[in-house]
Image (spheres, rainbow, N blue to C red):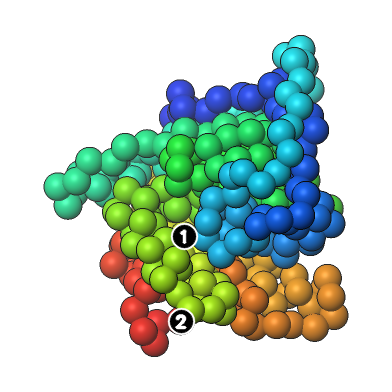
Amino acid sequence: MRWDDFRRSSNVEDDRGASAGAGFGMPGGAHGLGIGTIIILGLIGWGLGIDPSVLINGGEILAGGGMPSQQTSEAPVADDAQTTQTKDFVAAVFGDTEDRWTEMFAAVGKTYHPTRLRLFSGAIDGGCGMAQSVMGPFYCPRDKEVYLDMSFFQDMQNKFGACSDDKACRFSEAYVVAHEVGHHVQDELGLLPRVTAMQQAASSQTQVNALQVRVELQADCYAGVWANRAQQKHSFLDPGDVDQALQTASAIGDDRLQKEMQGYVVPDSFTHGTSPQRKRWFQNGFNSGEILACDTMSAGTL
């Protein structure tokens, strides 16, 4: 993947030196999940989450019910060369998503309002409450911001085998960023508020989860749409990049993660979709480059 020509976004904020130090404190009660449960749910949903709390309480934002976290006042983070390059890469991909989605919205008479990406390390207190790195990158609809701990990229390679090495991982990492931006696109289009209302009216957690799967698969498709438009603009892809992204999509399917973690699969608990579904919807977006190719909400589409 060649990304030197991408415009660097000015909407990337480095909050790693101000991340929360204490993490979650979750006593009993309405939101009484122990830290072990939080971590397990976070691992199951680590792949490209929209909002970590969806996995815990079915769409309600995780705020309240927990003990206050202690904030630490830390010195600015001193980056090595690899981290500096990764920050530049994230800003480049984020900037290009801004440019491509601005163009696509303008083509249909709409205005795209870019989101902001906040880099953190370990844990952070944001618009959706406390979040930890174990939950993976996510989009918070309350403050309309994307959250990312860059150590997630190493986890993709070292823990989950989503890609083989730093060079091979670059487009997979771009896919991760573009997926989270895809959730913001859903927010801009008014989909997320509608889905949240449907989840709140659902009669079972199974229905809540099924709706969340559709949201996640659409964000996968939107990531593919971005990649298509960016390829038209920059011809930035190297041979094998798309195959690598598809391997990443496969690695983070609910079925594969559950099988690896607990030895069996519980389809009713899926929140992101199966490996084949994630691959197919990314391909739908990449092959078409069109938002209309990403209708995951209609009956019979999955």
Q: Is residue 21 visible?
A: yes
Instruction: Provide the residue designation for mark 1.
Output: 219
Image quadrant assignment for residue 90: top right
As rendered, which of 285 and 168 lies closer to the eye? 285
- Residue 245 at x, y percent in the picture: 60, 60
Look at the numbered disc 1 and give the secondary structure of its residue. Answer: helix
Residue 281 located left or right of residue 158: left
Amino acid at the residue labelled 1: Ala
Q: Residue at x 46, y 81 (%)?
A: 302
Image quadrant assignment for residue 16: top right
Q: Residue at x 46, y 60 (%)?
A: 219
Q: Is residue 5 above or below residue 246?
A: above
Q: Is residue 214 above or below residue 145?
A: below
As rendered, which of 72 and 80 lies closer to the eye? 72
- Residue 253 at x, y percent in the picture: 65, 71
Instruction: Provide the residue designation for mark 2.
Output: 302
